[in-house]
Amino acid sequence: MIFVLIPILNRKELTLACLASFAKQTYKEHTVVIIDDGSTDGSGDAIRQAYPSTVIIQGDGTWWWTKSMNEGLRSVLPKTKQGDFVLFMNNDTELGPDYLEKLIDASIGHGRALVGSLVRNFYDARIQDAGVHADWNRFAFVKANFDEKKRFNENVDALAGRGMLIPVEVFQKTGLLSQKALPHYAADYDFSMRAKRQGFTILMSYEAIVLSKDKKGDKQRTFWKTHFNRRSSSNIPMKLMFALSDAPTSYLKCKGVAITLGRFMRDFSVYALKKFKIL
């Protein structure tokens, strides 16, 4: 059994399209759990009407991504048995009908590994995520090179939550997501890296493809929102906590903090010079 966890906040039509993909899966042993953190567009009613077997957990609008996923895990883990899986998924996605089969085959074929999905853009098919490598000396994640001849890529350091399959025994050893330290961004990377440190295999399946409709790159943010808003992947508190949590040595933890603060000061200097029309 696969327990699919999908956090949502509005975007009803995207959610319904995503659920339609799961309804068409050839692998039928799966249960979809929606964690609705305060939608106001009628998402819950629409889901209940179109897909009445879908479980909905209701949040209060303050859960963000990590608590939403943890609440989903707290709901499903007591119901799991040996051999089950949990799948993290976004609602702005569509999948081919054999997607779940490809994930299961990849995990079992690699000793019940954690498996990440190849993410392509829904609109133009360009690759958005083929895996990442951690470069701790630069405190950066480097995109893995995609080789279309390969079925899998075992040489990755972290997995994203947009299509991450996790054997249930991982949670027994690794625990839940880091809700306090990483309330929104990077909790997926942190979790997969902790699992890898605990001895679990992580890999990318290039056969399990997620089509992503994410358009967050189109948004323009102010300087302060870019660096301090939880919805920004560049926010400073998240980067500091991630460095302290996941860099492999004390030296690299300190280096990650120093690099993050240095980049912020550089960006702030440019911002200030432009604001006061010096630059």
Image (cartoon, helix red, strand yellow):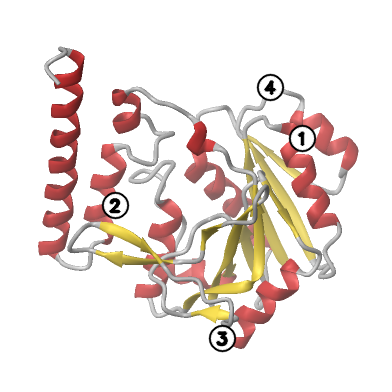
Residue 226 lies, with reference to residue 278, above or below; the image says below
Instruction: Characterize the local packing of mark 3: few (<14), some (14-19) or many (20 or more) Cα atoms within 10 angstroms.
Output: some
Q: Quadrant of residue 264?
A: top left
Residue that numbered label 1 is attached to: 13
Of residues 165 and 143, the one drawn nearer to the viewer in this rendering: 143
Residue 232 lies, with reference to residue 147, above or below; the image says above
Q: Please state the horizontal and vertical placement of residue 117, each as a whole percent of the image.
A: 59, 65
Q: CA distance from mark 2 to mark 3?
A: 28 Å
For the N terminus, the quadrant is bottom right
Where disc 2 sits, the SS reads helix
Q: CA distance from mark 4 to mark 3?
A: 42 Å
Give the mark, 4 or 2, whose residue is nearer the N terminus.
Answer: 4
Residue that numbered label 4 is attached to: 40
For the C terminus, the quadrant is top left
Residue that numbered label 2 is attached to: 242
Instruction: Characterize the local packing of mark 2: few (<14), some (14-19) or many (20 or more) Cα atoms within 10 angstroms.
Output: many
Q: CA distance from mark 3 to mark 1?
A: 36 Å
Residue type at mark 4 is Thr
Residue at the (18%, 54%) spot, across then down: 256
Q: Please state the horizontal and vertical placement of residue 103, each as a whole percent of the image.
A: 66, 72
Residue type at mark 2 is Phe
Residue that numbered label 3 is attached to: 110
Give the mark, 4 or 3, whose residue is nearer the N terminus.
Answer: 4
